[in-house]
């Protein structure tokens, strides 16, 4: 039954129960399986959350090599392909037109209706066995539906990270100053190669299938085989078309070149395949690719412009990001002045020189990127070669690079101005200490020599502030009051505010809940840290490094002295419960008995989750006065239960 709901949701995109009900059933099944291991089944949907931790991928040989397709950007060559096929076959034929999905290819092997193995393309002959990771992709059937599938077969398709997930992931990485994924394809292949299936599961990959292989396939044509595979539970794109003329093929291309921009996943072209398997066999293969198929790639939008300079920006945690400053140029409807250069390896690979005419592309990426240099336009007066800086452009400290990471960073955490200012700006943000000051104020205070670190904020006096330009008595008083109030901010937000690398809001909450105080956290071992849910090696190492540094320990001691909360409140600890565990609640309107923030805190203390917008995942709306009409309408449409404050408080009694 769970598999049915899973299929409804992930393959048909038409769930019949709420996510909450689904998750509840999943939890019940998990409990049942724990209590009765004799019922455990390797295909159970509970295994989708991913639990077996593989340290290295095993390499396996493909039964049928994974070939690539002949590529073209020219419609003329598409016509050549069509006419060549017609001449070789010399009989009527059909062409199936499909979208070319821009992810990472995967081959799945099913035996007796069960997924037994998932292998990446690798070098085409052998690939990585990534079965554990692939099992976390909810739209991939672990066990097939219906009947009529061959005893054993292979199905190939593309693993994709939908745009929405890609954006979410990159925002999260940006906030953590982790290197961004350049496009959903890199994000998908990077995710599939992670050594932690639980982390893979959290990234919400999807998979579309386009090629069925085996000895006893249900039909003698590609199109019909895929229709059968759809009935077995695979996500087969429903935009494939059978074409009977070159004209129909070009209509398909023209339509999807525009329409693809509205799809939830990235595509980079279309694929044309001869439909009949007999005809495919007649046409055969070249050494690299089938003669019965071709890929037509959509032109990415590209412009040529001059590279004026390259700047290196230093972020709050010291990460150095290279940015190309360009002569402004119009590209896909917007004026582009800057482009991402990602990292040192990319700069090296491009062999960039200042003054070069460069090609800028806006493909699937949000930020335009430089894809090449127009070598013909290079003058004899070649500009300087662009090199990634070796020392910090802000403080001169030699940069370091962590093993296995592409980014360089400046290790002078406490002496590098943008890092110092960045740390203070982060500390005062609303989600951390919520101190009433903007980045310009931080700049002013730093320039005036009044603050060098976050603890210095608590030494500020009204009389120091009024001495500064633009500071009136009133704003000075407000800031002092705001600082005063920040001493009441709960521990998890103080912890977040410290700006420890990789310790974002959620991680800070988890660490606070697990260790209760900064003292205990500072003493935690690697094993104790990684034992906490969702705390991996990388975060653990970063926390250990942070506390190993004497200067950080001194800073914490000072903050403690100034009265900041360095432990969870014993009161809150006692008030904790799991009465709202598994529930997602949206707060809307204004309330009589407690403030919105108090209600938010209550939800969290009792194991619930706050959310800002009503969706299929919402279990309750806690509604006060003046709830917005849009929210009300959406709640009614989704059938979300609305509760009022008295009811809510009763739930917690
Ligand atoms: S068919 C022998 N169909 O493009 C033919 N491939 O260079 C096997 N791809 O490696 C591939 N969408 O990763 C096929 N509708 C589609 C596709 C598709 C994307 C990818 C696939 C393959 C590459 C071809």
Image (spheres, rainbow, N blue to C red):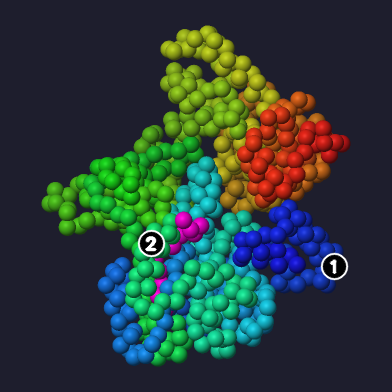
Quadrant of the rendering where the C terminus is positioned: top right
SS label for mark 1? loop
Q: Earlier in the sequence, mark 1 or mark 2?
A: 1
Badge 2: how crowded within 10 Å, few (<14), some, or many (20+)? Answer: some
On whether residue 23 falls in the magenta region, the answer is no
In this view of the protein, which residue sits in the foreground, 30 or 570? 30
Image disc number at residue 257:
2
Q: Secondary structure at mark 2?
A: helix
User: Residue 36 got which mark?
Assistant: 1
Q: Looking at the image, which is closer to me, 13 or 242?
A: 242
The reply to whether residue 136 is visible in this rendering is: no
Q: Which mark is residue 438?
A: none
Q: Residue at x 31, y 43 (%)?
A: 335
Q: Is residue 537 left or right of residue 373?
A: right
The image shows a total of numbered marks equal to 2
**Range covered by the magenta-colored residues:** 262-273
**Residue drawn 62% across the image and 52% down it:** 536
Q: Residues within 10 Å of mark 1 (few under 14, many from 20)?
A: few
Q: Report the quarter where the N terminus lies.
A: bottom right
Vertically, is 562 above or below 24?
above
What is the quadrant of residue 494 in the picture? top right
Circles 1 and 2: CB distance less than 8 Å? Answer: no
What percent of the width, then of the height, locates residue 378? Answer: 17, 53
In this view, the mark in front (1 or 2): 2
Q: Is residue 571 visible?
A: yes
Residue 264 within the magenta-colored segment of the rendering: yes
Distance from disc 1 to disc 2, alpha carbons, whole Å, reads 53 Å
Q: Nearer the viewer, residue 451 or 271?
A: 271
| In-image side of 591 versus 198 (left or right) | right
> Where residue 447 appears, x then y in whole percent?
43, 21
**Can you give x and y, in whole percent of width and height, for residue 322 in the image?**
36, 45
């Amino acid at each position: 039954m769970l598999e049915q709901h899973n299929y409804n949701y992930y393959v048909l995109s038409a769930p019949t129960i709420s996510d909450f009900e689904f998750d509840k059933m999943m939890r019940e099944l998990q409990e049942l399986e724990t209590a009765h291991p004799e019922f455990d089944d390797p295909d159970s949907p509970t295994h989708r959350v991913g639990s077996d931790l593989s340290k290295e991928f095993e390499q396996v040989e493909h039964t049928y090599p994974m070939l690539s397709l002949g590529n073209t950007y020219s419609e003329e060559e598409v016509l050549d392909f069509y006419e060549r096929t017609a001449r070789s076959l010399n009989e009527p034929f059909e062409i199936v037109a499909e979208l070319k999905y821009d992810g990472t290819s995967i081959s799945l092997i099913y035996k007796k209706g069960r997924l037994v193995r998932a292998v990446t393309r690798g070098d085409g002959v052998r690939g990585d066995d990534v079965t554990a990771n692939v099992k976390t992709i909810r739209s991939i059937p672990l066990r097939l539906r219906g009947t009529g599938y061959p005893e054993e077969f292979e199905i190939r398709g593309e693993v994709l990270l939908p745009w929405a997930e890609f954006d979410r992931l990159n925002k999260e990485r940006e906030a953590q100053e982790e290197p961004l994924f350049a496009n959903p394809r890199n994000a998908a292949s990077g995710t599939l190669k992670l050594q932690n299936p639980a982390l893979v599961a959290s990234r919400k990959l999807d998979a579309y299938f386009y090629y069925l292989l085996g000895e006893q396939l249900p039909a003698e044509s590609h199109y019909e085989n895929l229709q059968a595979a759809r009935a077995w539970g695979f996500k087969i794109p429903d935009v494939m078309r059978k074409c009977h003329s070159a004209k129909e093929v070009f209509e398909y291309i023209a339509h999807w070149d525009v329409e693809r921009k509205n799809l939830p996943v990235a595509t980079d072209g279309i694929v044309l395949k001869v439909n009949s398997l007999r005809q495919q066999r007649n046409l055969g293969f070249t050494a690299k690719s089938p003669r019965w198929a071709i890929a037509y790639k959509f032109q990415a939008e590209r412009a040529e412009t001059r590279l004026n300079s390259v700047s290196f920006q230093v972020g709050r945690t010291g990460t150095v990001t290279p940015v190309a400053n360009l002569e402004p140029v119009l590209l896909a409807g917007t004026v582009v002045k800057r482009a991402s250069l990602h990292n040192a390896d990319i700069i090296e690979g491009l062999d960039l020189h200042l003054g070069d005419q460069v090609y800028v592309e806006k493909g699937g990426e949000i930020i335009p990127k430089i894809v090449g240099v127009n070598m013909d336009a290079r003058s004899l007066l070649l500009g300087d070669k662009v090199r990634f800086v070796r020392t910090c452009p802000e403080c001169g400290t030699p940069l370091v690079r962590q093993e296995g990471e592409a980014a360089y960073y400046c290790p002078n955490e406490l002496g590098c101005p943008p890092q110092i200012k960045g740390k203070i700006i982060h500390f005062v943000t609303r989600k951390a200490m919520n101190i009433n000051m903007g980045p310009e104020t931080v700049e002013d205070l730093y320039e005036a020599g009044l603050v060098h670190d976050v603890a210095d904020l608590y030494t500020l006096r009204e009389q120091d502030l009024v001495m500064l330009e633009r500071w009136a008595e009133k704003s000075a008083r407000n800031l002092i009051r705001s600082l005063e109030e920040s001493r009441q901010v709960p521990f998890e937000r103080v912890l977040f505010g410290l700006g420890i690398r990789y310790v974002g809001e959620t991680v800070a909450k988890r660490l606070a809940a697990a260790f209760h105080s900064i003292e205990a956290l500072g003493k935690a071992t690697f094993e104790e840290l990684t034992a906490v849910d969702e705390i991996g090696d990388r975060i653990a190492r970063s926390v250990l490094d942070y506390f190993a540094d004497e200067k950080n320990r001194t800073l914490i001691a000072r903050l403690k002295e100034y009265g900041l909360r360095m432990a969870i409140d014993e009161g809150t600890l006692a008030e904790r419960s799991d009465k709202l565990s598994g529930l997602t609640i949206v707060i809307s309107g204004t309330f009589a008995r407690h403030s919105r923030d108090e209600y938010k805190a209550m939800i969290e203390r009792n194991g619930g989750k706050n959310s800002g917008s009503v969706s299929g995942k919402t279990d309750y709306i806690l509604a006060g006065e003046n709830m917005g009409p849009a929210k009300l309408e959406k709640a009614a449409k989704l059938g979300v239960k609305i509760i009022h404050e008295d009811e809510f408080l009763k739930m917690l009694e």
